[in-house]
Amino acid sequence: MASLWQITGVFAKIGTFTIGGGYAMIPVIEREMKERGWIDEDEIEDVVVLAQSAPGLLAVNMAIFAGYKIRGLKGSLAATFGAVLPSFLIILAIAMAFTNFKDNVFIQKFFQGLRPVAIALIVVPAVTMAQKGCKSWWQWLLMLITLFLVAFLKVSAIWVLVSILVVSIAITMAAEGRKKK
Amino acid sequence: MIGLLLQIFAAFFFIGIFNFGGGGAMISLIQDSIVNTHHWMDAEAFTDIIAISQTTPGPIGINCATYVGYEVMHAAGYSNAVAVAGSTAATLAVVLPSFIIFFLLMRVFNHFHNDPRFVTVMSALKPATAGLIGAAALILSFNIDWQAGSLLPQVELVKSNFPDWKSGLLFAGAFVATYNFKANPIWVILAGGVLGLIIY
């Protein structure tokens, strides 16, 4: 059986070598789990599907779900710790160094060129998510209303999400009530 | 100090609970909470953090949370050691809800994600999440001020992120490269930085 240190180590390795977030991690996690025989081939597919449908960060969900399959609660803690640790250490090192270099002319020019690019890279997932998630007119409308409320009227994102959660749960419950009658 | 750490923890705990769309959604929620609601950081500083989070290894949401936790404590005048505590608080808080949700729903989860009710709720949350991410990009690009009573909002570019036409070209180029040509984001960001060195 895999020791907890092994689990932490493998997920730390995965976290260190995947740049670009959760989706880049999926194939790497799949391969590591199969090669080590920690999770069966068909079970790993379940983990991926569940991790994608659960709320939260994909990478963290993958670590929690896969770790649980390997060694239960302790396994999921070990895997998550491993997946998060490299990010944490690398970012801290950069944050500490960056405060000293911030006023350097070259760093300022570098970041001046980089900022519009970073914003473009947020627009891309917004567009792809809208294309995937909006299949009927009411979904497009909901997307535009959310955009308008948050960007123009400065409504907090969390309130918008809570309202949508409450309304959509109420609608599904009402629909069920009708079916029963 | 403890007060601010607890505030950071609470803010990121809520961000963790309401994250329904991965790293991009996480960035929009962090911006909503840290920049727009708490005013712990301005748009320029946050844009730098996004850029760094996108180029370093690991999940973007975790990178961003760790960095913001550090910066908020540092900007409040605390030492590096205390700022590390800020990072720890933010990172723990943002991961914790995933654990709670998993262990609460574990028994039902295998059936849950195929449940038509769950599918309906998610079909409403996905478009909203797309809207949130779009709003985050808008807020980082424009100062939008809409006073009660005035017909149209006052909109102007965020000067620190878009100082001139060259930055507009960089934005358009980066969008086309990643969206149309599926270029690797890390190279796109680094190219932006190198072009910045040349043109500014």
Image (tube, coloured by chain):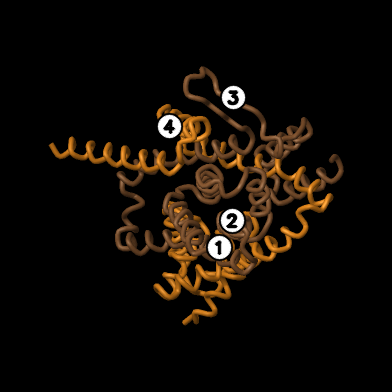
Question: What is the letter of the orange chain?
Answer: A
Measure the alpha-carbon separation of dots 3 and 1: 36 Å
Q: Earlier in the sequence, mark 3 or mark 1?
A: 1
* Quarter of the image where one finds residue A163: top left
Dot 4 and dot 2 within a common chain: no
Give the residue type at disc 1: Gly
The circle drawn on residue A142 is 4
Is the residue B167 above or below the residue A27 in the image? above
Residue in the picture at 79% in, 33% down? B166
Q: Which residue is mark 1?
A: B86
**Residues at discs 4 and 1 in contact (Cβ within 8 Å):** no
Chain of the residue under the numbered disc 1 shown in the image: B
SS of the residue under disc 2? helix
> CA separation, marks 2 and 1?
7 Å
The residue drawn where x is 31% and y is 55% is B111
Measured as percent of width and height from the top left, residue B9 is found at: 47, 59
Q: Are marks 3 and 1 in contact (CB under 8 Å)?
A: no
Q: Are marks 2 and 1 in contact (CB under 8 Å)?
A: yes
The kind of secondary structure element at disc 1 is helix
The residue identified by callout 2 is B72
Label located before the other in sequence (3 or 2): 2
Q: Secondary structure at mark 3?
A: strand
Q: Quadrant of residue B199?
A: top right
Badge nearest the viewer, 4 or 3: 3
Q: Colour of chain B?
A: brown
The residue shown at (69%, 49%) is B184
